Image: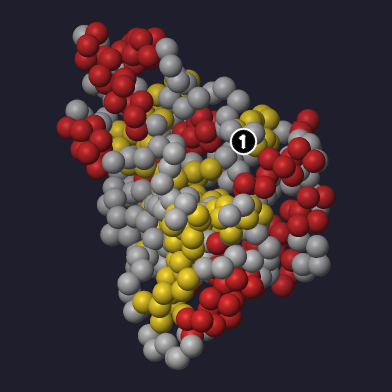
């Protein structure tokens, strides 16, 4: 059995960077033929965007803004290159956010993730993602078909019928959420039905705790996970080595400081930003709202792509204090005005039945009066008063959290 989907997975990282950024100008030029991207990237010369630094200078498109943009300019906010009537499917995700699917094979880049999970041509695959409106089932299904697999459109619910289909058709592979494969196994055991044909799975859409992964393995189903979103498909995936998630060859991934578009250093937790090469529905610097961090080195499986730790929480930490919104970007701005500061965290609490703010800021060698100067900057930027506490470098955790709302609930 071959170890890798193709030679792209094991090329030198520098060669991958050259290839991605050689292709990026054409992808941006194609995107800008759509009115939404023409507005978003107004003034950008696609030919100039040939490096990570040049890409980082482009504005972010926040996924959280898509519902409003699509409502103002239906159906897709003007970000679709292919017209709705020329698409293959038109999807609707929670938000609501609407997405078109083009006619290209493996439009969500899932075949590579499935291959890394042990899927091969001729396998029968049980697909328990929803086939109703949302694109997840089709992202994974198209990838399975690209590998030469047959798929069972199990969907969600109707557990007894799905077990009957598994017992009769004997799929060896599973795609769906990690929780649902356990439900299938539990229900089959109670009903005395044989679903032991299932041996491997690629799961997504929910957390995969180590305890659940171990339980499934103990019951004969080895699962790995992938990180995917409706707008771009599979962003990153696990291999058998299970040491981080490998960024898909179809994606340029950045990790930025929450609330900004500024890339962080390797290992720092920040917001996942993705750029895709989908010709029908391109995404240029889409801020996902998810937190992760880049892992150093390459995977033990031999794939040389960038690796991330996986999903580490949500990046949108905007908080209302005394009736006013405080954004992570404002805290980052405070840091920019005081270059001697390292990590910062704004702690929001309740004191004497009133909202209170304390900015914790790492500083190696604080000068006299620095805390007062930072407090003045904090008030200038946020229009709210807050205390400042300087702490030694390394005190604040590397978890991407810029604002911590510690007020009691209820």
Residue 306: x %, y % from top left: 43, 62
Percent x, y for residue 310? 39, 52
From the image, which quarter does the N terminus lie in? Answer: top left
Judging by the rendered image, the residue that carries numbered circle 1 is: 95
Identify the residue shown where x is 57% and y is 29%.
Answer: 134
From the viewer's side, name the closer residue of 189 and 33.
189
| Residue plotted at (65% across, 37% down) | 97
Q: Quadrant of residue 115?
A: top left
Could you tell whether 317 is left or right of 175 in the image?
right
Give the image quarter of residue 243.
bottom left
For the residue pair 202 and 63, the one nearer the viewer reads as: 63
Dot 1: element: loop
Q: Position of residue 255 (x, y in %)?
A: 50, 63
Residue 268, by quadrant, is: bottom left
Q: Nearer the viewer, residue 209 or 21?
A: 209
Residue shown at 30%/13% (left/top)? 167
């Amino acid at each position: 059995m071959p170890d890798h989907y193709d030679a792209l997975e094991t090329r030198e990282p520098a060669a991958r960077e050259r290839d991605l950024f050689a292709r990026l100008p054409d992808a941006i030029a194609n995107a800008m033929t759509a009115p939404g991207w023409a507005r978003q990237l107004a003034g950008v010369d696609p030919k100039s965007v040939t490096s990570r630094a040049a890409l980082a200078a482009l504005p972010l498109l926040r996924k959280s803004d898509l519902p409003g943009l699509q409502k103002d300019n239906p159906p897709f906010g003007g970000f679709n290159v292919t017209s709705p009537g020329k698409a293959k499917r038109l999807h609707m995700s929670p938000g609501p956010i609407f997405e078109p699917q083009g006619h290209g094979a493996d439009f969500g880049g899932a075949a590579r993730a499935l291959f890394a999970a042990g899927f091969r041509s001729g396998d029968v695959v049980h697909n328990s993602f929803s086939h109703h409106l949302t694109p997840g089932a089709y992202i994974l299904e198209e990838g399975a078909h690209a590998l030469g697999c047959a798929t069972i459109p199990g969907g969600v619910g109707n557990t007894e019928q799905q077990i009957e289909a598994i017992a009769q058709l004997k799929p060896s592979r599973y795609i769906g959420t990690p929780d649902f494969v356990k439900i299938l196994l539990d229900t089959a055991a109670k009903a005395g039905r044989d679903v032991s044909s299932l041996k491997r799975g690629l799961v997504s859409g929910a957390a995969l705790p180590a305890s659940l992964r171990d339980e499934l393995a103990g019951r004969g189903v080895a699962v790995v996970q992938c990180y995917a979103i409706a707008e771009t498909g599979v962003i990153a995936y696990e291999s058998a080595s299970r040491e981080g998630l490998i960024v898909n060859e179809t994606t340029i991934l950045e990790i930025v400081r929450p609330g900004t578009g500024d890339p962080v250093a390797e290992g720092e937790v920040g917001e996942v930003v993705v750029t895709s090469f989908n010709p029908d529905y391109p995404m240029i610097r889409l801020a996902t709202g998810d937190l992760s961090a880049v892992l150093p080195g390459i995977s033990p499986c031999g794939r040389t792509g960038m690796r991330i730790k996986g999903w580490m929480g949500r990046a949108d930490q905007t908080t209302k204090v005394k009736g006013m919104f405080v954004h992570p970007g404002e805290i980052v701005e405070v840091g920019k005005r005081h270059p001697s500061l390292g990590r910062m965290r704004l702690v929001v609490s309740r004191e004497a039945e009133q909202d209170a703010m304390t900015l914790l800021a790492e500083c190696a060698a604080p000068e006299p009066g620095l805390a007062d100067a930072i407090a003045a900057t904090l008030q200038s930027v946020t229009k709210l008063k807050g205390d400042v506490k300087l702490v030694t470098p390394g005190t604040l955790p590397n978890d991407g959290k810029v604002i911590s709302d510690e007020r009691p609930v209820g």
